[in-house]
Amino acid sequence: QQQVKQSPQSLIVQKGGISIINCAYENTAFDYFPWYQQFPGKGPALLIAIRPDVSEKKEGRFTISFNKSAKQFSLHIMDSQPGDSATYFCAASMKSGTYKYIFGTGTRLKVLA
Amino acid sequence: EAQVTQNPRYLITVTGKKLTVTCSQNMNHEYMSWYRQDPGLGLRQIYYSMNVEVTDKGDVPEGYKVSRKEKRNFPLILESPSPNQTSLYFCASSRRTSGETQYFGPGTRLLVL
C-alpha cells in the first residue's frame, strides 16, 4: 500500500529528445508527488512537484503529468540535454496521517551528446 | 547559506563498533529524516522526526536509533553496526511536514567490515 513503483530503471536518450519516467502508487491518501534529481556524489534535490488537484505542471523543460484515477504520474523532460544526465527519483507523501516519505527506486538517465 | 550538514562524509568501521552520524540544519525546519540509498532499492526511509522529542520509524528502522533533543540536530546511531548496514546515508529536512520539499544533506558513505 505504501509502495511507489518507478520505471524504467535506466534510460538512454539522444540530445534534444524527450525523456519519460513513470511512477505508480497505491495509497490514495498520498497528496504530494515530487521528483528529485541526483547527480553523482550529491544529495537529491527537488526538481518539480505536483499535488493531486491538478493534472499537469510545467517548469521550463520539465513537466509532471498526473493521472489520479490511474494512480500514476510521470516526468517528461523535453529537449533533453547532456547536463540532464542524472538519477531521477519520484516520491509520494502526505501532509497528515502517516508522515512517511516514500521514494521510487530511481531511474538513471543518460543523454547522449 | 541554508543547508543540511552531515558528518562524517566517509566512514569505515568494523562490525559491532558503535557509531554516530550527525545531521544539522540551519533552516528551523520541523521535519527531519534519515534515508539509506542502495543500488536498485532507491532511497528508503529509516526514521523521521516531526519535531523535538517526536520520532517514528520509517520503512527500514532495524539496527538504527535516533534522537531529537534540539530542533536543528538529528543524529543517527548505529549501536552495533553490521556489514548489511554498509550504505550511503542521507539526512533531510523540510519546513513542517512530510508533504513538502525535502532538503538533503551531502550524504555519508559508510563501510562496515
Image (spheres, coloured by chain):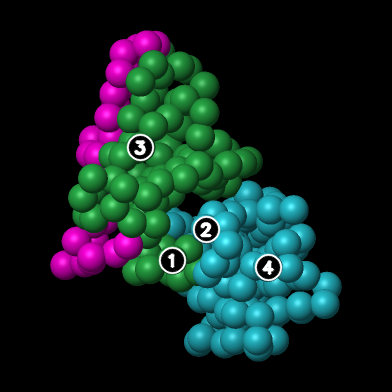
Chain colours: A cyan, B green
- Is there a contact, CB below 8 Å, between mark 1 and mark 2? yes
Q: Quadrant of residue A50?
A: bottom right
| SS label for mark 2 | loop
The chain under label 1 reads B
Name the amino acid type tagged 2: Tyr
Q: Residue A22: x, y in percent?
A: 72, 65
Could you tell me which residue is drawn at 52 percent across and 69 percent down? Answer: A95
Name the amino acid type tagged 1: Thr
User: B81 or B62: nearer the eye?
Assistant: B62
The chain under label 3 reads B
Mark nearer the N terminus (2 vs 4): 4
User: A109 or A45: nearer the eye?
Assistant: A45
The reply to the same-chain question for discs 2 and 3 is no
Q: Residue B44: x, y in percent?
A: 54, 44
Name the amino acid type tagged 4: Ala
Residue receiving disc 2: A99
> What span is in magenta?
B1-30
Q: What's the CA distance linking mark 2 and mark 3?
A: 16 Å
Q: What's the CA distance linking mark 1 and mark 2?
A: 7 Å
Can the viewer see residue B11 in this picture?
A: yes
Residue sitting farthest toward the right? A70
Mark seen at residue B66: 3
Q: Residue A71: x, y in percent?
A: 77, 70
Label 3 packing within 10 angstroms: few (<14), some (14-19), many (20+): many
Residue sitting farthest toward the left? B1
Q: Is-magenta flag for residue B112?
A: no
Q: What's the CA distance linking mark 3 and mark 1?
A: 18 Å
Q: What's the CA distance linking mark 2 and mark 4?
A: 11 Å
| SS label for mark 1 | loop
Residue receiving disc 4: A29
| SS label for mark 3 | strand
